[in-house]
Image: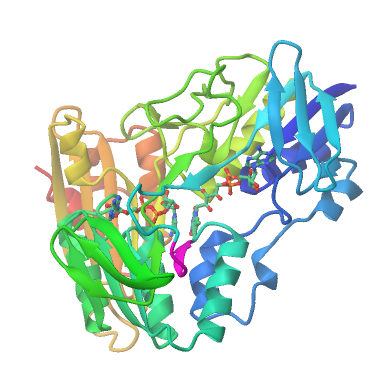
Amino acid sequence: MKKIVIIGANHAGTAAINTILDNYKDCEVTVFDGNSNISFLGCGMALWIGDQISGSDGLFYSSKEAMENKGAEVYMETPVGNIDFDKKLVSATTKEGTTVTKEYDRLILATGSLPIKPSIDGMDLDNVQFVKLFQNAQEVIDKLKVHEDIKHVTIVGAGYIGVELAEAFKRKGKEVRLIDVANTSLSGYYDPEFTDLMDENLRSHDIELRYGETVTKIEGNGKVERVVTDKGSYETEMVVMAIGFKPNNLLGKDHLKLFANGAYEVNKSQMTSDSDVYAIGDCATVYDNAIQDVNYIALATNAVRSGIVAAHNACGTPLESAGVQGSNGIRIWNMNMVSTGLSLTKALKHGFNAAATDFEDLQKPAFIEEDNEKVKIRIVYDLDTRRILGAQLASNYDISMGIHMFSLAIQEKLTIDKLKLLDIFFLPHFNQPYNYITMAALQAK
Ligand SMILES: Cc1cc2nc3c(=O)[nH]c(=O)nc-3n(C[C@H](O)[C@H](O)[C@H](O)COP(=O)(O)OP(=O)(O)OC[C@H]3O[C@@H](n4cnc5c(N)ncnc54)[C@H](O)[C@@H]3O)c2cc1C
Ligand SMILES: NC(=O)c1ccc[n+]([C@@H]2O[C@H](COP(=O)([O-])OP(=O)(O)OC[C@H]3O[C@@H](n4cnc5c(N)ncnc54)[C@H](O)[C@@H]3O)[C@@H](O)[C@H]2O)c1
């Protein structure tokens, strides 16, 4: 029996565990997780806080029991404290204080990421919240229920989590302020032509936007009373920190090769610099097809795919990841935005001789008078190689499926010219004969 130990049983770990248990009967699987729950979908946190779903039950898709039923030995609330990589031993302490030591043939690290905590004064005040775990969301919801005096919430970080939570707190009837060091929301994913639309959307729902400001301290008397930035001081009763994640590399940082931000560097088989150790999900790097190099992109989708790849390799079936494009999407009130690959801003920063081609039109012919919304598209490409580097779409219409084609285009190194005469079907219920993808591609220089 091959002994496989998996540390971390959230999205990446769960995908690896299920892949092994479903496909390889000759493996002995031991799982450790420091938390009390498995597979919490953080993407549902804003929906839960904003009362758009009835509760948190549907936000889990696996459990200790489900894994045990398939044959795994699962230790919950049992953080691994040490790995002896030479002797191939993992040691963890259970909630009751017992030490469990397990030997492995192959180890899969799925320890995820931790929220970035700025070192500023006031972080330990009451009502300074982080939003990563199920327990974090539960705490926010409980506080809003119990403390009716929390009328104003300040969110630091206008990335994906911050923007989604701004809507959620507004739906809860709170006054909301969003602070970011960047000059727009979602600056890591979209160009200003798109983020301007989102910011207009946020402003029109009375979200106070404070961009280009850095929080220097949080003040209060036991609990939060105000946030102070390099440009002003603002009264508030709750501060939510959402300024990104850092890879959780505590267990392997002194043994394994690390990427610039500390993530475990892996090859396309998810193998680390130690050939018996794999790393998956938010604690590991990805191969980014847009820049054609190793990168760090923390997404649940990457976590799941990397878990499947590592599981097969750890069990002896060679399988390589196709790489990723960082495809992502967001819906705030009725506005949908999706992107993949590089924005023009990012492409230029990466040194590409990049250009963008834009088009805006109705989704369907103008004679369709109902359920027909404007769509804005940008395709980013390399003027030297003609390779498609990224795409962005925005609309009140659900254009989410459109981005997958661009994801594949980037993965397969397609040129912008190949898109120009692509066979795209037409039916007035869906789109236009001169549809915006064709039109944007035809206009490329
Ligand atoms: C609010 C929010 C919304 C999000 N929305 C989306 C979305 O819409 N789409 C999307 O693609 N992504 C989204 N993400 C990102 C996504 O949740 C992460 O990319 C994903 O959780 C990564 O999964 P993971 O299993 O690699 O790591 P994690 O989810 O971080 O899990 C790591 C696990 O390892 C365990 N662990 C860590 N150290 C130890 C140890 N020493 N011993 C034992 N166990 C340990 C932890 O307890 C945890 O269970 C969101 C994240 C948040 C917080
Ligand atoms: N819809 C989705 O796909 C979705 C939803 C939520 C989260 N996620 C993923 O989860 C991860 C974490 O999300 P996130 O929103 O925390 O990260 P993020 O990278 O999306 O956003 C972080 C934001 O914080 C800002 N920032 C950084 N340091 C700051 C500081 N000191 N003060 C003020 N602002 C600061 C950045 O400019 C950025 O806008 C990301 O990888 C994200 O893609 C995805």
Looking at the picture, tell me which residue is in the foreground, 382 or 211: 211
**Residue 213 in the figure: left or right of residue 292:** left
Relative to 61, say whether 253 is above or below: above
**Residue 68 in the figure: left or right of residue 337:** right
Looking at the picture, tell me which residue is in the foreground, 34 or 320: 34
**Residue 271 in the figure: left or right of residue 125:** right
Q: Position of residue 323 (x, y in %)?
A: 46, 33
Looking at the picture, tell me which residue is in the foreground, 92 or 335: 92
Q: Position of residue 409 (x, y in %)?
A: 36, 41
Residue 442 can be seen, yes or no: yes
What segment is highlighted magenta in the picture? 125-130
Colour basis: rainbow
Q: Residue at x 48, y 79 (%)?
A: 50
Q: Position of residue 86 (x, y in %)?
A: 70, 10
Q: Position of residue 431 (x, y in %)?
A: 32, 70
Task: Identify the image quadrant of residue 324.
Answer: top left
Taking the magenta stretch, the answer to whether it contains residue 128 is yes
Q: Work out which quarter of the rendered image holds the N terminus and state it.
A: top right
Relative to 320, say whether 195 is above or below: below
Taking the magenta stretch, the answer to whether it contains residue 24 is no
Residue that lies at the very extreme toward the top in this rendered image: 86
Residue that lies at the very extreme toward the front in this rendered image: 221
Q: Residue at x 86, y 38 (%)?
A: 98
Q: Work out which quarter of the rendered image holds the C terminus and state it.
A: top left
Q: Residue at x 73, y 34 (%)?
A: 6
Relative to 96, say whether 335 is above or below: below
